[in-house]
Each structure stands twice: as C-alpha cells, then as structure tokens.
Amino acid sequence: MSLDIKICGLKTDEAVAAALDGGASHIGFIFFPKSPRNIDPVGAGRLRQAAKGRAKAVAVTVDADDTTLDGIVAAMQPDMLQLHGKESVARVAEIKTRYGLPVMKVFSLRERGDLDQITPYIGIADRFLFDTKPPEGSELPGGNGVSFDWQVLSALDASIDYMLSGGLNAGNIADALQATNAHGIDISSGVESAPGVKDVSLIREFFRAVRAAKSADAA
C-alpha cells in the first residue's frame, strides 16, 4: 500500500524543498491568524510553485467564509482544501461546488464515540483527517503536538480513507503505522524546532523513520 505523506504548516523555501525532496505527496499551508504557521495567500502561492508536478498543495482553513476562501484559492491555486473547523455537511458540499476542488474534512478525536461525527460527511468529503482534540485552553484546532489513542480507529470501517495526524514524529511513526490503517499521515509540529519553525533536519529524519517503518513492515 502506498502511503501519502503531508508536511503541513510550511512557510519557507527550505522547508518546502526538504518536504518535496523527502517524498511528500502533499504540502500544506495554513491560513489561520492565531497559528504560528499562518501564511498569507500570496506567499503560499509562491511557495507552492515548487510542488507542481511533484506533490499536491493543500490550503488549510478554519471556518473560513467565501471571501477569505476566494482570496486563498485565487492567490494560491491549491489542489485541495482542508477544512479544520466546525464546517457542516452543507458547508462542505457548498465549498466543493463553489471551487471545484476536493475537500479533506478534519475531525478531532479522543474516544471511539467521536467517530460517529463523520457519518453524515461520508460521500461528501473526499477524505478525512483525524487529529487530536486540542488541549484545554488551546486556541489552535491542530498542530498542538499531542496524539490520541490510535486504538480508537480500530472501530472505523476499513473502507474509510483518512490521513492520521496529531503528535506524530520520527520516534512514534512506526508505532502509529502499525496501529492504524491510515493511507496517509500528516505532520506539522513534529518537524519543528519551535512553534511554526520547520527544521529541515527533522523533516529529513522523519522521512528516514517512515522509510524504515515501511521496510520493517514489508519484511
């Protein structure tokens, strides 16, 4: 099984290059002012040029209105939209129709019952991303460097396509892949030296760990 790898929250040429050279299938740009990974649409549009023909560029938003999304899509020209807020089923369908782009809907998990929330979105969202519920007091819906109990996903129908996120790093990625059926993984804070600061050496280390985990699984 091929594994999609998304490096999210990119802001520099060096980090984009490291992600692409490592073999990322997706690179993510975050449009959320409260995030240390926030970037302006024009800057993201410049950085995403390097990914053309190599990886899909993903625009990550949180309950963004049409005006905000219009600006992001026009300036960045993303390949996919990632919705990390409380967007309703109707809103997801509306966004897909308005922009003609695939949509990945994010859900925050802590326990098995949290999976019930995805049911109405099946067949509407093109893909799901499962992240950890943010710690008490956090203003960020993701990128908090905290993982959830991956055994929660054992209750998930095997046909559901999703990316796994939340607290992933080079040290735990092998365990995460072994514990889940994820067809994709998403990492942000796990390859940073400080909040919002991507570390090229950590990005490379992460890809080495993924390759080692996949080789061990194939052996």
Image (cartoon, grey):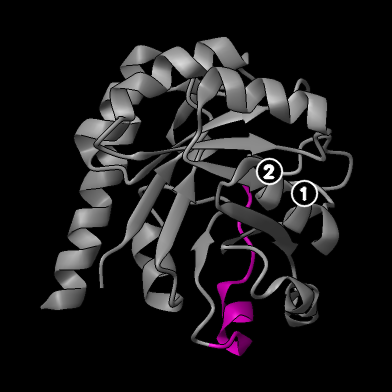
Q: Which residue is labeled 2 in the image?
A: 142
Q: Where is residue 59 drawn, in percent x and y?
A: 58, 34
Q: Is residue 49 above or below residue 156?
A: above
The mark tally for this picture is 2
Choose the circle earlier in sequence order: 2 or 1. 1
Give residue 175's position: percent from left, percent from top: 39, 68
- Classify mark 1: helix, strand or loop: loop
Horizontally, residue 122 falls left or right of residue 43, namely right
Q: Secondary structure at mark 2?
A: loop
Q: CA distance from mark 2 to mark 1?
A: 7 Å
Badge 1 crowding class, 10 Å Cα cut-off, few under 14, some 14 to 19, many 20 or more, is: many
Q: Which residue is mark 1?
A: 134
User: Which residue is drawn at the image coordinates 50% and 27% (left, top)?
Assistant: 77
Task: Determine which quarter of the picture holds residue 172.
Answer: bottom left
Query: CB of mark 2 within 8 Å of CB of mark 1?
Result: yes
Q: Nearer the viewer, residue 100 or 151?
A: 100
Label 2 Cα crowd, 10 Å radius (few <14 / some 14-19 / many 20+): many
Residues in magenta, as a range: 146-157
Kind of residue at badge 2:
Gly
Q: Where's residue 170, x and y in %?
A: 35, 48
Queried whether the magenta region covers residue 185, the answer comes back as no
Side of 216 where 105 appears, left or right: right
Q: Quadrant of the N terminus?
A: bottom left
Q: Position of residue 71 (x, y in %)?
A: 68, 20
Is residue 88 at least partly visible in the picture?
no
